[in-house]
Amino acid sequence: MAHDGRNPFRHRRRADTEPRGKALRHRKRPAAGAPLGVVGRALIVAITAALPLVPAHARAGDLSGSVSLASQLVDRGLAITSATPALQGGIAWTTPSGWSLGLSSGIALRSPSDIAESVARVAHAWTLSGDWRMQADMVYYHYAGRLHANVYEPGVYWVYRDVLTFGLSVVHVASADDHRLHPAADLNFRWPLAGGFSLSGGLGIAHYAVPYGNPRNERYRMGYYRYGEAGLLWSHGPWQAEIDRVAIDSGSRNYLDSFAASPWLVILSRSF
């Protein structure tokens, strides 16, 4: 993330069986933007080109997409964009055998020519029992708006009846000044109510690193912060609306307050 010259390392994942997650880390680069990494470009090209190259009988799967309008792009309690409306769109291809490929991107509407984030994802899901499923994925995130980072994240998730999801993941930030893997864990739920409404919520913990000192003698405060969200979701056919209360723990605000998301998040989306 690039904001007033300071970038916290953070990571998030939202509460559903198609996690929507990310991380960022300080990079000793000017704030003009982060170039798309070589591995990231290769991953995006591979995903884009994979479908036409797969034999027809193996391609028997579902192609889906979604478009959403949000009051802010938020990642594990921290802001991807400033508090301004943002548009996201994505496509995903899922096979009956449990493999899925996906691409998505998001922009702040006040700067529509600048892509704030791009995501490429490869995942495989399988059934453990009548109640439990498991999923493993590899996700690449490119931040080119307020955030400036190229991030690689493998993760594994356990899903109970599409109601409860527990996930573990680690984050590697390309070209960072260390080569540490930064862990994160999430527990999320969605409880259906009548009339298309659902209660949703989640909490988690992730590692961060906040730089301090002058540029020639820069050091980092590192530690873990806790985050959570709770909200109400409404679905009707392809449409979905959601309002969430978002927060990070008060003890971390000394270092993360300027990066904290707005306390309320509103999202309207349509799938196709």
Image (cartoon, rainbow, N blue to C red):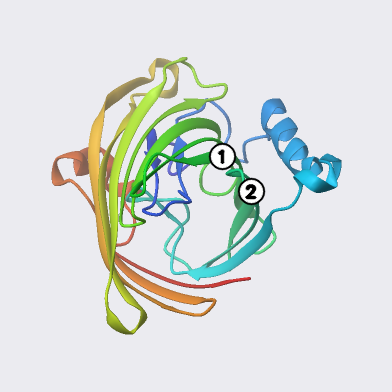
Q: Residue at x 62, y 53 (%)?
A: 104
Decide: is 215 above or below 31: above
- Which residue is nearer to you in this view: 158 or 177? 158
Q: Kindly indicate the quadrant of the structure image that contains residue 30.
A: top right
Res. 211 image quadrant: top left
Q: Which mark is residue 123?
A: 1
Q: Which amino acid type is marked by label 1?
A: Ala
Q: CA distance from mark 1 to mark 2?
A: 9 Å
Q: Residue at x 36, y 56 (%)?
A: 162
Residue at 51% x, 27% y: name it. 27
x and y percentages locating residue 61 in the rendered image: 69, 54
Given the image, on which type of amino acid does mark 2 rest? Gly
- Relative to 120, say whether 92 is above or below: below
Q: Residue at the location (26% across, 42% down)?
A: 204
Compared with 107, 173 (above or below) is above
> Would residue 27 appear left or right of 188 to someone viewing this image?
right
> Between 36 and 61, which is closer to the camera in this rendering?
61
> Where in the figure is residue 269, as x and y percent of width and height?
51, 72
Q: Helix, strand or loop at disc 1? A: strand
Q: Using the image, tell me which numbered label, if any, was put on residue 90.
A: none
Residue hosting label 2: 102
Q: Is label 2 in a helix, a strand or a loop?
A: strand
What is the x, y in percent for residue 201? 26, 59
Residue in front for this viewpoint, 11 or 6:
11
Residue 110, can we see it? no
Q: In the image, is 127 to the left or to the right of 86? A: left
* Circle 1 Cα neighbour tier, 10 Å, few/some/many (<14 / 14–19 / ≥20): some
